[in-house]
Amino acid sequence: VIPQPALAPRRKIREKAMPFLGVAVVLLLSLASPASSCTEQERGALLGFLGGLMPGGNGGLKVSWVNGTDCCKWEGIVCSSDGTVTDVLLASKGLRGVISSSLGDLAGLKRLNLSHNWLEGSLLTELVFSRSIIVLDVSFNRLDGHLQELQSPNPALPLQVLNISSNLFTGHFPSTAWGAMKNLVALNASNNSFTGQMPSSICTNAPSFAMLDLSYNQFSGTISLGLGSRSMLKVLKVGHNSLSGALPVELFNATTLEQLSLPNNFLQGVLDGSHIAKLSNLTVLNLGSTGLSGKIPDSVGQLKRLEELYLDNNNMSGELPSALGNCSNLRYITIRNNSFIGDLSTVNFTMLDLRIADFSMNLFTGPIPESIYSCSNLVALRLAYNNFHGHFSPRIGNLRSLSFFSITNNSFKNITNALQMLKSCKNLTSLLIGINFKGETIPQDETIDGFENLQVLTIDDCPLVGQDPLWISNLENLGMLDLSLNQLTGQIPSWIDGLGFLFFLDISSNQLSGNIPTALSKLPMLLSERNAAKLDTRFLELPAFWTPLRQYRTVGAFPSKLCLDNNNFTGVIPPEIGQLKMLDILNLSSNSLTGEIPQEICNLTNLQTLDLSDNQLTGAIPSALSDLHFLSRFDVSNNKLEGEVPSGGQFDSFSNSSYSGNPKLCGPMINNDCNSRPSSASGKRRNNLRPALVIGITAGGLIALILNG
C-alpha cells in the first residue's frame, strides 16, 4: 500500500447547503399559504412548461396538472392568499426536456426550484433577470451554452439566490449582469466549464452578498473580487480551477469569512501570519494543493472557531507551531505531502476535538505524541511515510472511536505489542501497518483478538518471518488482506475460505510453498455478484492511495484481487479457480506451476489482469480467453507453452513480450507463422518416413539391378 499525492480530478460533487441559506428559504416559504384558485394566465404558463417536457419525462405531473382545474392545488405549486403562483418546486422529479419561456409569464413567481432533473437547453434570461424571482435553483441538470449578458440597464433585480451548479455551462462568466443584482446573497456556479477571469464585481455591487462558489470550473488569472472591509462575504469557494498568483491582500479584509476554500489551483507565496489572524471567524480553511510554501504561522492559534484545516499537497516546511493546540474546535486537519519536520509532540492535542488527522508524507520524527491519545473522538489517524519510531503506548486504547489507522513506512518496533495494544480499539475497520517492524516474527499468538470489525489489514514489506497467523482466521469481516513482500513460509492455510468477506488477497513475494488450495476457489465474495453486493459501501474516513494517481473512498471500490506471485507454489492451477466470477486480477507468476492452463479460467469474465508468467506451464493457450472483453493485461511469458496464440478481442492489443520465452508458440501476433513450421507431431511423422523412404529406394535399386542383370 503506497499512499501518494494525487490531485483531485474535476468531478460532479454535491456541496453541503449553507445553513444560513436553508434558513432563509424556509423563512421565505413560510410567508406563502395555499390559495383557492389561480388565474387563467398562470395556468397556461404552467401548462406551457409541461408541454416543453419530453413524453415520459414529466415526472407524473400530468396526473395533477390538468387544464381547467385549480393550479394552486397542482403538485409542486404554491400560491399566495390572493391566488398568485409564488412557488414552483419540482426538484428531483425526473423531468426531461427544456425549460419553457412560459414560466416567465408567472408575474408573481418568487421561488423556482428545478434542481436534480435532466433538463437541457439554455438558461432563459427571462428567469435570471426576472422582476419577481428571488430564489432560482436549476442545479444538477444538463443545461448548457453561455450565460447571456444583460442587454440594457435595469433597476435592481430582486434575485437573492442563484444556483446553477452541476450543469454544462461554458464560456466566460457575464460581467455586466451583476450591476443589476444588488440584492444577490448567494451564487453557486460550481461544477461547470466556465473559463476566463473570475467575475470581480459581484461583492461590490451587492452589499449583502454572502456566499460565492465557483469551484470545479476552468477559471484562470488571479483572484480578484473587489473585496472591501465592509464586505459581508461568509463563504468563498473557488477550488479546482486554474487560478494563479499570490493570495491577494484584499482577501484578508473580508473579516466576516467563515469558509475559505481555494484548493487545487496554481497559487504561490506563503501564509502570512498577520493576514490570517484577521480571519478570526474562519471555520474552514482549505488551501490544499495550491503550491504554498513556508511555515504555518503561529497566528493560526488565534483562529478559535477553526474546525477544518487543509494544507495538504503543498511545499510547506518547518515545525508545527505549538499554537495549533489552541484551536480548540479543530476537528479535521490534513497536512499530508509537505516537508514538515520535528517532533509532533510540540503540539499539545489535549484541548482539540480532533475527529480526523492526516500527518502523512512529511519528515516528522519521534514517537506518536502522548497527548493525541486524549482525543477520544478521533476516528481516523494517518501517520504514514514519516520517520516516527519506538513502541506503541498502552494509551492508544483510549482511542475508542478510532476506525482508520495508518502508520505505513515508519520505524516502529514490536509488532506483537502493537497488535496487543490496538485490539482495544474495537471500532477499527482499516489497519495499515506495513513497512515497519523490520525482520520481526509475525505473531502467532491466538490471544490477539478484538479486531471483529476489521475490514482492511495490510502488514506488507516488513519483512516479517513466520507463517500465516491463525488469529487472522477470526477476522470475520475482513475484506482486504495484504501480507506481500515478507518472508512468510509454509502453505496457504485451509481456513482461508472461512473469511466470508475476503475479496482482496495479496500474499505475493514471500516463500510460501505447496499446491494452490481449492479453498481459494470458495471465497464467497468472488463467487457471485449477489455476494459481492454485501460489501460495506460506506465511505472510508480517509481516502486510501493504492497507486500514485488513484485513490479509493470505499472498500468495495477496490478491485477483486488474488495475487500469489513470487512464491514457491507447485502443482497445477486448480480448475476450480474458474468459479471466481467476480475476480478482476489474477497473478500466479514466478512460481513453479506445471500442467496446462485450465479451460475454466475462460469463465472469469470480469478479469482485467491475468499473469501466469515464469512458471513451467505446458500445452496451448485456451482460445476462449479472447472472449474476456475486460482483459487489459495478459502475460504467459517464460513457460513451455505451444500452439497458436488466440486472436481477436483483447488479444489483438497484447505485445510480443506477453508470449516471449515460449519458442513453440506461433501466430501473427508474435510474427511466427504457424503454417511455416511443422508441429511436433507432424515433424515426428516426417522423421518416421525418412528410414522407410531410404529402405524403399535401396530395395528398388537392388531389384532393378537384378532385373537388368
Image (cartoon, rainbow, N blue to C red):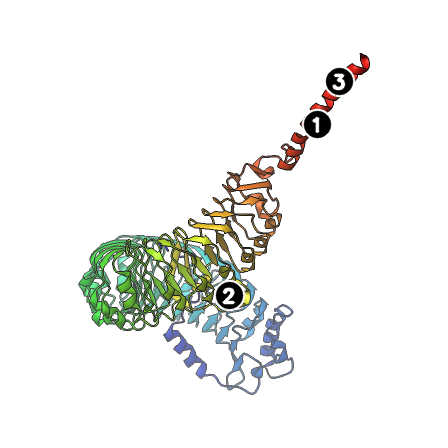
Taking the image as shown, residue 67 lies to the left or right of residue 381, namely: right
Measured in 3D between alpha carbons, the distance from the residue under mark 1 to the one under mark 3, in whole angstroms, is 15 Å
Q: Which residue is disc 3 drawn over? A: 702
Callout 2: helix, strand or loop? Answer: helix
Taking the image as shown, residue 225 lies to the left or right of residue 370, namely: right
| Picture layout, residue 32 above or below residue 317 | below
Callout 3: helix, strand or loop? Answer: helix
Amino acid type at circle 3 is Leu
| Picture layout, residue 184 above or below residue 223 | below
The picture places residue 208, in percent across and down from the top left corner, at 35, 71
Amino acid type at circle 1 is Ala
Asked where in the image residue 444 lies, by quadrant, the reply is: bottom left
Mark earlier in primary sequence (1, 3): 1
Q: Which residue is disc 2 drawn over? A: 524
The quarter of the picture where the N terminus appears is: bottom left
**Camera-side residue: 423 or 248?**
423
**What crowding class fits label 3: few (fewer than 14 Cα within 10 Å), some (14-19), or many (20 or more)?**
few
Q: Are marks 2 and 1 in contact (CB under 8 Å)?
A: no
Q: Which residue is disc 1 drawn over? A: 692
Which label lies toward us, 1 or 3? Answer: 3
